[in-house]
Image (cartoon, rainbow, N blue to C red):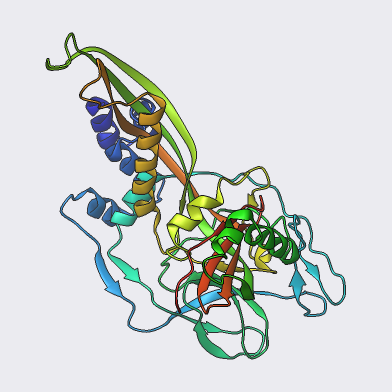
Amino acid sequence: LDAHLWIARISEDGAERRKHLGEILARSPSHSEAIRELMLLNEEITLEEATRSANPAYDPQRLDAPAPVSVRTTTLACPKCGGELTLAPNSTQAVCAFCGYTEKPHVKRELGMKSVSMELIRKRGQEVAWAVGEHLLQCKTCGAERTFPPGKIAARCPFCSSKQVIQKDALASFQQPDGVIPFAITEAQAQEKLQQALNSRFERFKGLFRDNSVKQTRIEGVYLPCWYFDTVLQVTRTIHEKSSRYETAMPTRQENLTEMANDVMVFGVKSPPAHLLEQLGKYDLAPLVPYTPELLASYSAEIYTLDFDAASLQAREQISQQMREFHGYSDDPFADVTVTVHTLVQQMSFRLVLLPVWVATLLEADGDIRPALVNGQTRGVVLGKARKP
């Protein structure tokens, strides 16, 4: 691999350089030096960015934005009458609520995956990593200037009620979603499933000890950002056999396996809490469509607060645990056989998907507040613990 790398570095022929870099990546897909050289060859990063990312001692300067950062937005309004656009459940076409204008069908395109290795190199090559607190929006409809609600990618102007969707901010502090899974159930259907969960036998049993009846419910449909990871990894499974339970285990057999773990989910928000979001279950990715701002016509959407690099670490932990369970990991000191399982990620890619979730706040008769979630696709209900306000 080193020979291919140095030939690629000294060659002045772009095709030859690409050939040798391809040879490296075919054998070692996560080879960071080859990836960096290829990104430089493709003009995806500058020479200065490549130099910074290659320096193991370099770390981008992390600064807080001193003021609200201006944004470029899209206004979701009917091009004919200026009326409000809405989106029906299971639909990807926006319709005007006033004149009936229907948006043209979206052009089909592939929902490609991004390489974690490439994006890490791109991120390390930055000179400054900005932390943005608030965004500054100038409404395209009425001209009013205001700060955008923190953590939101779509919201309404309080002066003219027009729907605004952030496309990009002045510091390029976040990336656009890659795809969206549309809402499959209405608010009424979500309320019905929530009521069924509250009327379950277990909830009625709890009501014998405290008044947990719901007096008021606030529910909102929200698109929550979720990172999806696909991974190719090397799994090493070592089996230790003992002739006696008191003798030291000696490795007797080792297996090297190539495995894949696809569609590993890591939600990119801190609220709702992760332990509730994990209970929503898996989403069917078949209805996934490429992201366009018009898909947010009827619902609000959150900006991720957990970046892809931190999310990838969580995904690796999940994958390692899955592989240990699948390959029979056992560390029982009294067993005749113990099995150790080690994983090494060879290639990891990702995409950012907006998932439909109905987020509810329940006010109980005893004054407690209880969070609840309804999966906007599968109708699964998650009830959180009640707490004092």
Where is residue 193 shown, x and y percent of the image?
69, 58
Q: Residue furthest right?
A: 99
Considering depth in this image, is 321 or 33 the residue closer to the camera? 321
Q: Is residue 221 above or below residue 348?
A: below
Residue at image position (33%, 50%) is 120
The reply to whether residue 199 is in sight is yes
Residue at image coords 24%, 15%: 336
- The image shows residue 245 at horizontal and vertical percentages of 17, 16
Q: Is residue 170 positioned above or below 144 on the image?
A: above
Tell me: 2 left or right of 322: left
Q: Is residue 358 above or below residue 166?
A: above
Give the quadrant of residue 165.
Answer: bottom right
130 or 10: nearer the viewer: 130
Q: Residue furthest front?
A: 208
List x then y, in percent, for residue 220. Answer: 63, 70
Q: Residue at x 15, y 53 (%)?
A: 57
Q: Quadrant of the C terminus?
A: bottom left
Judge from the rendering whether residue 378 lies leftward or rightward of residue 25; answer left or right: right
- Residue drawn where x is 54% and y is 58% of the image: 177
In the rendered structure, the answer to whether residue 381 lies left or right of residue 233 reads right
Can residue 16 be seen by looking at this rendering? no
